[in-house]
Amino acid sequence: MSKKKLGIHTICTHVGEIKDEQFKGAISPIYMSTSYEFDNVDIKRYPRYFNTPNQEHLSKKIAALERAESAMIFGSGMAAISHMFLAFLQKGDHLVVQNTLYGGTSNFIREEFHKYGIEYTFTNSHKEADFIAAIRPNTKVIHIETPSNPLLTITDIKAIASLAKSKGIITTIDNTFASPVNQNPLDLGIDIVMHSATKYLGGHSDILAGAVAGSKDHIDRIWNVSKNLGGSLSDMTVWLLERSMKTLALRVKSQTKNAKKLAKFLNKHSDVTKVYYPGLKSHPEHELAKSQMHDFGAMISFELANGIDAMAFQKQLHLIKSSMSLAGVESTMLLPSETSHALLTQEQRDAVGISDRLIRFSVGIENYKDLKKDIEQAITKTKVAAFA
């Protein structure tokens, strides 16, 4: 049966399985060897070549989920994005990059690109006009992130892809926040999609990994760089990631359902001044999100009213963990100014609207009513302590 005709739950469960021909087990066997036969074989396998049996088959699952010809997996999301950039950019080239995106990506560009002689321009906003203004004759790649981390801005994927194609520019996107369940950018014209697989693909806060997906030609070009940089991951982690991805659609759909309810709750709360969630009709790009996403995702950001300390509030939470990273089955909150965007200067954070009061909320699979109660009691206790 064609992979294109399979439903997403079936893809998560079955595509990329390794059949256990010896013992007929129900799950993929794990191949831990770092050394394989080289004579009279079709593929010379080696972990750093990203082609051990487990690596190869898991890549097929990721490709199927993103409706891509090919995919690769890496030791982290930053390994995936850095290898992707270095495959398509060289000395004298120019990158246009969205201004609202993951802080680690921004930091990598600002701290490392000058060593390679690669130029870059951060857009003033996520609007198409700002991308047009930033393009130069030597622009080779445009990189976007939508929904963005942590402000949940929505960039017009089709418009950016069309703009880039008209000028022969490669487009790349960080699809981590949406996941393949809620958004498939390749269908909208993007060339290469990447993920921090640490997040929704792993989903249990116990795996560090990254992934890229796209055409075979594009992935082959990334592989040609990556085989020299050594950013592969162990087959034990690959096997765990494949196991986790079997429930990807179930997890993300449950988390998204919770997030939509919690965003509405927070938006009406008298002690919350701002809520960033594309599923809210008040979100400035709500209609755009509806047009390019299957659903709105499970990430919310919000700001508490003046006088309610954001860190003190998180310390009062019982169920929701004050924790770094995101997208696990458990709900977590953090301050981007102290974590994901801590490497940026105060001026740089202010420029993109990341205040010290901003809280990023990764919604888990717990019962909605329990999460709501936890937030309510934490706000109440923080207010009492502040005005005592």
Image (cartoon, helix red, strand yellow):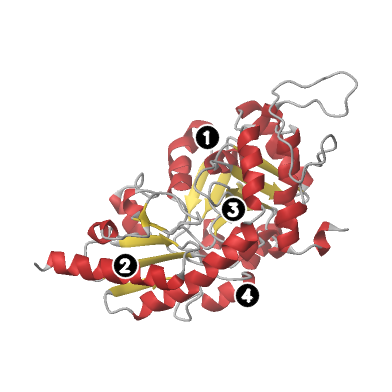
User: What quarter of the picture does the C terminus occupy?
Assistant: bottom left
Task: Kindly identify which numbered label has been placed on residue 291.
Answer: 4
CB under 8 Å between discs 1 and 3:
no
Query: Which one is in front, 255 or 111?
Result: 255
- Which residue is labeled 2 in the image? 303
Please tell me which of labels 4 and 1 falls first in the chain: 1
Query: Which one is in front, 232 or 375?
Result: 375
Distance of label 4 from label 1 (alpha carbons): 38 Å
- Which residue is labeled 3 in the image? 142
Please tell me which of labels 2 and 3 falls first in the chain: 3
Please tell me which of labels 1 and 2 falls first in the chain: 1
CB under 8 Å between discs 2 and 3:
no
Position of residue 158 measured from the top left corner of the image (x, y, whole percent) = 65, 67
Query: Which one is in front, 236 or 131?
Result: 236
Distance of label 1 from label 3 (alpha carbons): 17 Å
At 75% from the left and 42% from the top, the residue drawn is 57
In the picture shown, does residue 47 fall above or below 368? Answer: above
Quadrant in the rendering for residue 336: bottom left
In the picture shown, does residue 117 fall above or below 2? Answer: above
Please tell me which of labels 1 and 3 falls first in the chain: 1
Distance of label 4 from label 3 (alpha carbons): 21 Å
Q: In what element is the residue under mark 3?
A: strand
The residue sitting at the right extreme is 40
Quadrant in the rendering for residue 275: bottom left
Q: Nearer the viewer, mark 4 or mark 2?
A: 2
- Which residue is labeled 1 in the image? 117
